[in-house]
Amino acid sequence: MLVTIILGLVVATSIAGMNAVPGRLNDDCPNCADETISSRTTKWTMPLLKLGEKRYYLGIFFKANWYKAAQYCRYHGMHLVSISSQEENDKLEKHIKDFGLGHEHFWTSGTDQGVEGAFFWMANGWPITFENWNAGEPNNFRYENGEEEDCLELWNRDSKGLKWNDSPCSFETFFVCEV
């Protein structure tokens, strides 16, 4: 039943986008992106939110580990999100909260799998310069099974907003893609 509803939403969005004004999916979503290739087809069949120069997709229909989330984004021509400013972080947080999901975890492309403690954005290869860590993070906590925390997530741990946390890459959660 859930698959039917989701599929129906994607099809309805695609059909609605065929008659939309270029640059918008429809009047109900003025910030959603629509890159029209021709009058009958669109490049994106997924609802993308335009915030500044980037477009974002919230992966909220299933939870995935960091690798599967990255694979899903790449399959759809995107990357896991990289966050370069407090303004970008705040806009994403507002959008996530507007969906009623401010209490959830969301993968980003941040990782320190190459060198412990040296976080970078997998989406573009750049070292992380802007930071918004939860207090005491990153801490590279080691679990009983030996797994350590090497992937960066957004998480409202202390009801202080969506801040950053390092988490085991195998943890299954929602994610944010960007294009």
Image (spheres, rainbow, N blue to C red):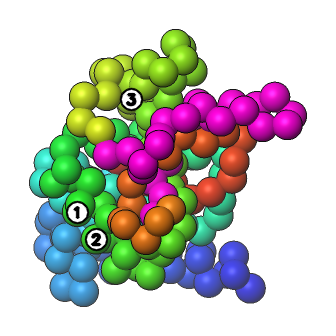
Residue 128 in sight here: yes
Three-letter amino acid code at disc 1? Lys
Whole-Å distance between the Cαs marked 1 and 3?
A: 19 Å
Three-letter amino acid code at disc 3? Trp
Whole-Å distance between the Cαs marked 2 and 3?
A: 22 Å
> Disc 3 designates what residue?
121
Quadrant of res 57: bottom left
- In this view of the protein, which residue sits in the foreground, 113 or 33? 113
Q: Residue sitting at 69 percent across and 53 percent down?
A: 172
Q: Residue sitting at 39 percent across and 54 percent down?
A: 163
Q: Is residue 48 above or below residue 144?
A: below
Q: Residue sitting at 29 percent across and 39 percent down?
A: 131
Q: Residues within 10 Å of mark 1 (few under 14, many from 20)?
A: few
Give the residues drawn in magenta, as a range: 132-156
Q: Is residue 36 above or below residue 110?
A: below
Give me the disc on residue 91: 1
Question: How far across and down, in percent of the image, does residue 164 sit?
Answer: 42, 48
> Disc 2 designates what residue?
94
Q: Residues within 10 Å of mark 2 (few under 14, many from 20)?
A: some
Q: How many marks?
A: 3
Residue 77 in sight here: no
* Side of 3 relative to 89 (left or right): right
Q: Quadrant of the N terminus?
A: bottom right
